[in-house]
Image (cartoon, rainbow, N blue to C red):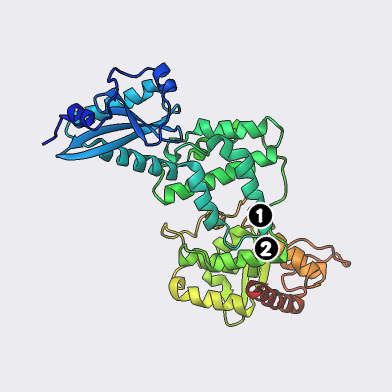
Amino acid sequence: MVDLLVDRNAKRNLPTMKTNRLTEIKIRQIKPTERPRKVADGAGLYLEVAPTGGKLWRYAYRFCGKQKLLALGKYPDVSLQEARKRHAEARTCLAGGTDPSDVRKVEKQLGADRAKNTFEFIAAEWLIVWSRGKAKTTIDHTQSRLRNDILPVLGKKPITSITTLDVLTALRRIENRGAIETVHKSKNIISQVMRYAVSTERAEQNPILNIYSSALQSRKPKHMASITEPARVAELLRAIESYKGTYQVQAALRLAPLVFVRIGELRSAEWADIDLARAEWKFVVSKTKTEHLVPLAVQAVEILTEIHMLTGEGKYVFPGIRYGRPISDMTINRALQSMGYDTKEEMTGHGFRAMARTLLAEELGFPPEVIEHQLAHKVPDRLGAAYNRTKYLADRRKMMQAWADYLDGLKTRK
């Protein structure tokens, strides 16, 4: 049973002073003494004055027969009026059979939980996960955009309360200074943080999905995003090896850099076109409608042999969820996005072709005509001969194996 004889018990312990209620003037006139002193305001509320002159609001009360004390703040940070308000709230809890100290503990915990659910807190957590295997410059750029452009607007907001308008406000702030590229890069960062919050069950939806392209200024058109720096290619290859999606998609990701065909040709690859014994893949190029031959390196044959045990009875090498159809045209890009890559700015499925074209020439020194022929591009011919799928075939076989070995070396390089 709650003991409501709080005033009588509190007053019993107070020093002999006038018990008339405090005023701001009286509080300012209180002088410290050698020992802490208590100056009552009434109903258990008093001001504890330290020998150093500090003044702390306290509420003395009894709950379930035990004497208890509740701190209400420091004067003058907490004024007399505010102290009385907090005191009244505590007494209301007490009258209802609840210990005000327990209420205070719950409020503090709720405050801590709310702090952990802010965009800033979750973004910091996401950054730790996303940064694994990333180049220092990439991490620095992302941190800079968060610090300078995103957190000042969204940082303190609870993740569950962030709306499409909130995000648009943050992006328009960047847009107004003319940094259009930064707008879209920041949009991607916000989206990744929100996706992380959804996947960890701290948000229900990603407000970015409701921002249409027409709501922001468009970027200047540019070539398909591709990674061509050897160190960053190594990071990408290691990220692919650690990909946690379906086995079919991981196999497609592992094969993509080895064969560097158009992504539509990769996803719709058919077992009928692949000869594992001869290490060849023949198909009709979707863009030019010409026959093409891809010599398969040992590493590519190994990947295809592994997945053949899973999908070899069907038509497609990489079947999708829907029966009788291959994986969708967005599957590879979505997988890259799930690994933290911006498919508009950093790497796209089509980017494996630019990666191979650049590094085969610059790092491995293969002739442009051999590379371009393997890419199924039209190559100027001195004799004006038509495209021939077997042209430079011996050179292309050597090149494809050298390329696969080079990628293996990058992947294991520390």
Q: Are marks 1 and 2 in contact (CB under 8 Å)?
A: yes
- Mark 1 lies on a secondary structure that is helix
- 57 up-or-down from 20: above or below: below
In front: mark 1 or mark 2?
1
Q: Quick one: 356 or 85, which is closer to the camera?
A: 85
> Could you tell whether 246 is left or right of 391 in the image?
left
Q: Which residue is mark 2?
A: 232
Q: Is residue 297 or residue 285 the one in the foreground? A: 297
Q: Quadrant of the N terminus?
A: top left
Given the current orientation, which residue lies at the most extreme front position?
34
Query: Which mark sits nearer the N-terminus, 1 or 2?
Result: 1
Quarter of the image with the C terminus is bottom right
Query: Counting other residues with Cα less than 10 Å from the Cα at mark 2, is it few (<14), some (14-19), or many (20 or more)?
Result: some
Give me the disc on residue 323: none
Query: Which residue position is annotated with label 1?
Result: 138
Q: Is residue 341 left or right of residue 31?
A: right
Residue 230 occupies quadrant: bottom right
| Mark 2 residue type | Arg
Residue sitting at x 31%, y 38%: 104
Q: Residues within 10 Å of mark 1 (few under 14, many from 20)?
A: few
For the point 53% across and 48% down, the residue is: 192
Q: Find residue 265 and report its horizontal and vertical position in percent.
A: 60, 61
Residue drawn at x 64%, y 70% is: 258
Task: Kindly identify the amino acid type of the residue bearing the numbered disc 1.
Answer: Thr
The residue that appears at 57% across and 40% down in the rendered structure is 151
